[in-house]
C-alpha cells in the first residue's frame, strides 16, 4: 500500500508560468516532507523540505505548501524554466522511524520554451 | 570531493550470476539505503542500514542481500534469485538525525542478459 502518492504522472507548462506539482499521503504520523528532482540516469537531488510544524517553506523559485488536514503537499515553481524539466519526487518520513523515507511515484515536468 | 560513489555506472551480467554493486560515502552519514528504479516507476526501497552491522529489509528485499561492515560502505548483491534484476539502482545516505534529507549517488544501471 503506497503511503505517498503522486497522481499526476506528467505535467506540461509554458516557460515563465507557474508549475504546481501535487502529492498526497495517507500516514498521519509523517512529519517531514521533501521534494527531489531527478534527471534520467542520474540520482535524485534534494530541492526543498518542510516539517509538519510549518505550512509553507520557500527557497528561491521553489515553494512547498503543506496542508496537514488534507494530507496534501504541493511544490510551486515560479517562474518555470526549461531547465526545470525533470521528474519530481515527493517523499515523507515520520518520527517513529525518521530514517525510513517513503517516495511517491514521481511527476514528469516538461517546461516548454 | 565529498559525496557518494557508485561504481560502475553500467554493469552487464549473464543470467544466473550474482553481482555486487558498490556504494561508498565520505559524508560520515550513519544511514545508507538501496533503491531500485524501473522505467516510468518511482523509487522502491530494497534495504537500508541505520548503523554499522545492522540493516533492515525494505519493500522489495527478495533476491537481494547487503552488508554494512564499515560506515563508509554498503554493498548490494543481486542474487540469481532476483527474478527481474535489470534496473537502475540508487544508493543513498542520510545523517541519521531527524529532519534531514537523503543524498543520492549517481546510480548503477544493471543489465542482465
Image: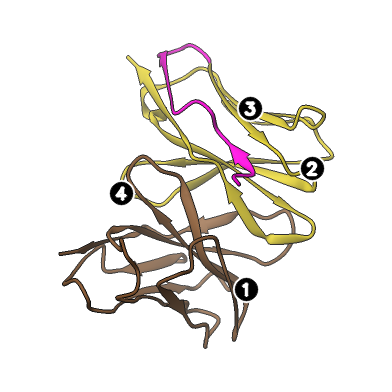
Question: Disc 1 designates what residue?
Answer: B30
User: SS for tag 2?
Assistant: loop
- Colour yellow maps to chain: A
Examine the structure image and report whether residue A52 is included in the region drawn in magenta: no
User: SS for tag 1?
Assistant: loop
As measured in the structure, the alpha-carbon distance from the residue carrying label 3 to the one carrying label 1 is 30 Å
Determine if residue B29 is in view.
no
Quadrant of the frame with the N terminus of chain B: bottom left
Please name which of the two marks, 3 or 2, marks the residue nearer to the observer: 2
Please name which of the two marks, 3 or 1, marks the residue nearer to the observer: 3
Determine if residue A89 is in view.
yes
Lateral position of residue B54 relative to residue A109, left or right: right
Asked whether the beta carbons under mark 1 and mark 2 sit within 8 Å of each other, the answer is no
Q: What are the residue bounds of the magenta stretch?
A: A1-18
Residue lying at 16% horizontally and 72% vertically, measured from the top left: B14
Lateral position of residue B30 relative to residue B24, left or right: right
Question: Disc 4 designates what residue?
Answer: A41
- Colour brown maps to chain: B
Quadrant of the frame with the C terminus of chain B: bottom left
> Which chain does the residue under circle 4 lie in?
A
Lateral position of residue A42 relative to residue A90, left or right: left
As measured in the structure, the alpha-carbon distance from the residue carrying label 1 to the one carrying label 4 is 26 Å
Which percent across, then down, holds residue B35?
Answer: 46, 59
Asked whether the beta carbons under mark 3 and mark 2 sit within 8 Å of each other, the answer is no
Residue lying at 41% horizontally and 43% vertically, measured from the top left: B41
Which percent across, then down, holds residue B25?
Answer: 47, 72
Amino acid at each position: 500500500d503506497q503511503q505517498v502518492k503522486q497522481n499526476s504522472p506528467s505535467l506540461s507548462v509554458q516557460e515563465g508560468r507557474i508549475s504546481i506539482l501535487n502529492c498526497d499521503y495517507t500516514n498521519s504520523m509523517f512529519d517531514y516532507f521533501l521534494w527531489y528532482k531527478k534527471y534520467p540516469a542520474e540520482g535524485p537531488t534534494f530541492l526543498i523540505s518542510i516539517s509538519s510544524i510549518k505550512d509553507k517553506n520557500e527557497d528561491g523559485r521553489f515553494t512547498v505548501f503543506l496542508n496537514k488536514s488534507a494530507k496534501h503537499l504541493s511544490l510551486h515553481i515560479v517562474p518555470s524554466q526549461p531547465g526545470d524539466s525533470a521528474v519530481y519526487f515527493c517523499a515523507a518520513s515520520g518520527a517513529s522511524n525518521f530514517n525510513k523515507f517513503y517516495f511517491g511515484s514521481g511527476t514528469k515536468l516538461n517546461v516548454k520554451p | 570531493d565529498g559525496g557518494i560513489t557508485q561504481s560502475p555506472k553500467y554493469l552487464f551480467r549473464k543470467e544466473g550470476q550474482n553481482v555486487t554493486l558498490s556504494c561508498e560515502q565520505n559524508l560520515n552519514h550513519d544511514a545508507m539505503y538501496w533503491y531500485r528504479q524501473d522505467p516510468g516507476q518511482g523509487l522502491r526501497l530494497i534495504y537500508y542500514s541505520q548503523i554499522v552491522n545492522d540493516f533492515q529489509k525494505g519493500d522489495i528485499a527478495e533476491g537481494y542481500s547487503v552488508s554494512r561492515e564499515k560506515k563508509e560502505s554498503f554493498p548490494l548483491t543481486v542474487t540469481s534469485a532476483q527474478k527481474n534484476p535489470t534496473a537502475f539502482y540508487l544508493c543513498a545516505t542520510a545523517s541519521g538525525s531527524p529532519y534531514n534529507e537523503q543524498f543520492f549517488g549517481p546510480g548503477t544501471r544493471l543489465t542482465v542478459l
